[in-house]
Amino acid sequence: MATKTRSGFGRQSLPDRIFDIVNWTIMILVCVSIAYPLWFVLVASFTDPNIVNQGRILLYPVKPFLGGYERIFRYPPLWKGYLNTIVYTAAGSMISIAVTVPAAYALSRRDMKGRRIIMFLFTFTMFFSGGIIPLYLIIQKIRIYNTIWAMVLPSAVSVYNLIVCRSFFDTSIPQELLEASRLDGCTDFGFFFRIVLPLSSTIIAVMVLFYATGIWNSFMNALMFMAEQSKMPLQVIMRNLILINQASMITTDASEMIMRQKLAEQLKYAVIVVSALPLLLAYPFLQKYFVRGVMIGAVKG
């Protein structure tokens, strides 16, 4: 009888040990290659730009320089941009969930006539679209230009999210459960609201994460459909701040020009940190739902 370790498993053979060592080595290298760029951006946002431009491998702030953060937090439109982005993200996520989840459930029902044709039409839009100009004309025609609706309605439904959500309902809600509810006199609406939704907290959390991330990082919709600076989201505000500081670098004073150049360089890193920080703080708490959502879409499309 093979000897056993304390964990109850037999001793690993030499090939298994070699495999584990190689596997762990590869995984560590992959994790470092993913994590270090994020850490570098964070460290560079607190480091003198002259040090950063030398191409060093930074593990901690060298010669701290906080001019970028001081410039950002003294920029009045920043806080308005944060507020706008929070409002757009919250409203857009709720609208997207209210549209995507019922549509995905309906398309998962095998007794729905024409569901394959409807699903084909949805999928078709993933590869072919009308383009920016027709979308702009529609936004103006329905009179939502320069309003919150121009930020949340064009992206209310993501076909990829719809497919993932439909796959969840198709594989996780048994047909027998629907038949049992019908025997008890439950209607289709009652079954959806009383049974399906309580069992779908995981996929709803995944959809909220997907949609909120997309809206938070939205950039082009604001440039195309928003006219007033006071209604711009955070990403556009940060981009404008960088452009303003790059334009202000032109001066006859050499020392002042060097200082402005340093400020403009650090702003690039500081802007990334400020704009991405809320999502980075929220992601660890939602990571398990994110992984489940990706696996749901990978198993069955």
Image (tube, rainbow, N blue to C red):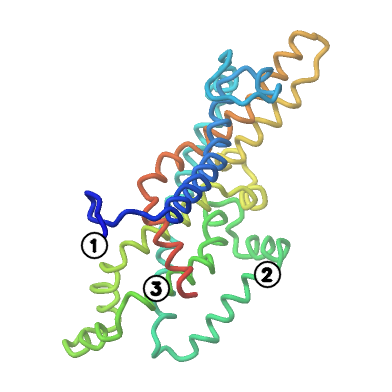
Dot 3: element: helix
Q: Which of marks 1 and 3 is nearer the N terminus?
A: 1
- State whether residue 120 is above or below residue 205: below
Q: What residue type is labelled 1?
A: Met
Of 118 and 227, the residue lying toward us? 118
Q: Where is residue 209 in the image (x, y as percent from the top left)?
A: 43, 54
Identified at 40% across, 43% down, the residue is: 282
Residue that mark 3 sits on: 102
CA gap between label 2 and label 1 equals 66 Å
Disc on the earlier residue, 2 or 1: 1
| Residue 280 placement, left or right of 259 | left
Q: Mark 1 points at which residue?
A: 1
Residue that lies at the very extreme toward the left in this rendered image: 184
| Viewer-proximal residue among 196 and 235 | 196
User: Label 2, label 3: how many angstroms apart (C-alpha)?
Assistant: 24 Å
Give the image location of residue 288, x and y in percent: 36, 54
**Quadrant housing residue 150:** bottom right
Label 3, residues with CA under 10 Å away: few <14, some 14-19, many ≥20: some
**SS category of the residue bearing label 1:** loop
Query: In screen coordinates, is 150 left or right of 95?
Result: right
How many numbered dots are placed on residues in this image?
Answer: 3
Q: Can you name the residue that lies furthest to the right here?
A: 252
Q: Name the residue under label 2.
A: 129
Residue 173 or residue 36, whichever sits in front = 36
